[in-house]
Image (cartoon, helix red, strand yellow):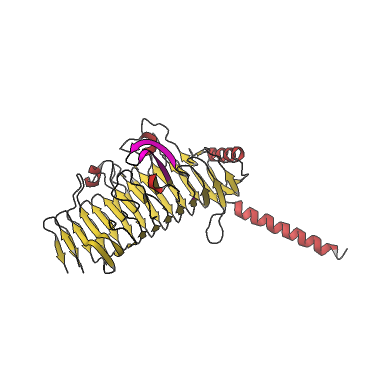
Amino acid sequence: MRKVKPIIIVIFVTFSLVTLASSVTDQNYDFTIEGQNNPEQDIKAIQEAVDKGGAILLRGIFDFGNKGRVNIKKDVKLVGEMDNNKNPITKIKRGFWSFHSPLPSKESPPESPGPKITIQGIHFDGAMWTPIFLAYTSDADISNNKITNVIPFEIKRKWQGGDSFWWQAGAVLGTQFINWKKTPFAGAVTGKLVFQKNNVDLQTDKPKVTLGQGVYYQLTWGADIEVRENVFTNVSRNSIETLDNYLDKEGVGRVTIANNKIITPIEGCPFPGPTSYPNGIVTGWFHDMSGGMDPSRNSKILILDNYVETSAEFANGIISLGNDPVILNNQIVMKGGAKSKGIKQIGSNAYIANNKIEGSGEWAMQALTYKILKGNGNTFAWNDTENFKAFSSDYLCVGNNNTMLGKTSKVVDKGKGNMVLK
């Protein structure tokens, strides 16, 4: 008996510790769901929990099938398990817009704010088009996720590349793909919209016909957009894209893109235009460029401390479409492409300072006009192009009254009133 008793005690203590650990892990969650790697069971289990709202812990491997989707209509926090290095252990396979917050109506603005949504610590693998599409939310936190093997979705449309192109994205926040209008639904996608510490790899076997977007914000309303500390690789069009994001009636709205690491592929997609691809960061206004000149609509944009590495013939490190952006302390390494550019400012009154452009390309920096946007009154201050080999020149000024401060070796001036101050 004396020999057996310690064994029984050890077993009891071990069991108690396991139970305690499980309790500590689950105590902050309303539901804990174990993945069954089965589309019928997994989608139903998560959807039922999401319909109730609250905090949900997801464990194991889930399979959403080829077209499976969970629609989010209530405040919810979806969290997967992570290891000590914040790498996701929980996996969700496949799905089509795997987590989606649909608009209540495609015809009119919503009457009340959308759900507050958190998606953290999940490895999304093999989703079609995108694993995360939020078209209705009043706050979103998408962080510490891993996104791989996104399957491009075919769009039937004639263009210079054929009768179809394909679309894939790491995450989409905005209403464009719901109503296809050029203006947002007021209040549909708003609040603080964070995309942080995610790892997005959009590797595809057909990059020349795939419009890839690492994270895509478009047609938001009064949103505080933050894209921070992410890693983007193999994105065939734009790794970070924020376009046509409106101030609300109180003048609220801004975009902050900071501390991201971007490595673009050698090949990319020339849709919708053939002159630039694949790109690191694209911000400003595209569908309605007048918004980029309108202080009542134009969200303030700050781009700082990002690392962008390009290799393609027509690649751009950063493209800004609109007035008043601030672009600071970014490092752009251009590894190939006689037509590639470092920073392209299309618009006026930008402050572009302390950026470092290395490698080789057509231009390090440009102040350009395009359609109604004017490349006037921009300030380029103390940017480092010492280790950049220009096939054309370091700077191109097509607009007027731009100022370049600091060491500037080569400038092509096609405007009026541009100054170089050393």
Residue 29 is left or right of residue 310, and the answer is right
Q: Is residue 114 visible?
A: no
Determine if the magenta segment contains residue 153: yes
Q: In which quarter of the image is the C terminus?
A: bottom left
Please provide percent x and percent y for residue 373: 20, 47
Q: Is residue 262 visible?
A: yes
Residue 409 is left or right of residue 314, and the answer is left
Q: Which residue lies furthest to the right in this view?
A: 1
Determine if the magenta segment contains residue 105: no
Picture quadrant of residue 315? bottom left
Image point (69%, 59%), residue name: 17
Give the magenta range: 148-168
Please provide percent x and percent y for residue 294: 22, 45
Q: Nearer the viewer, residue 123 or 350?
A: 123
Residue 360 in the image: above or below residue 241: below
Please provide percent x and percent y for residue 68: 53, 38
Residue 258 is left or right of residue 204, and the answer is left
Image point (61%, 39%), residue name: 41
Please provide percent x and percent y for residue 295: 23, 47
Picture quadrant of residue 178? top left
Image point (11%, 58%), residue name: 417
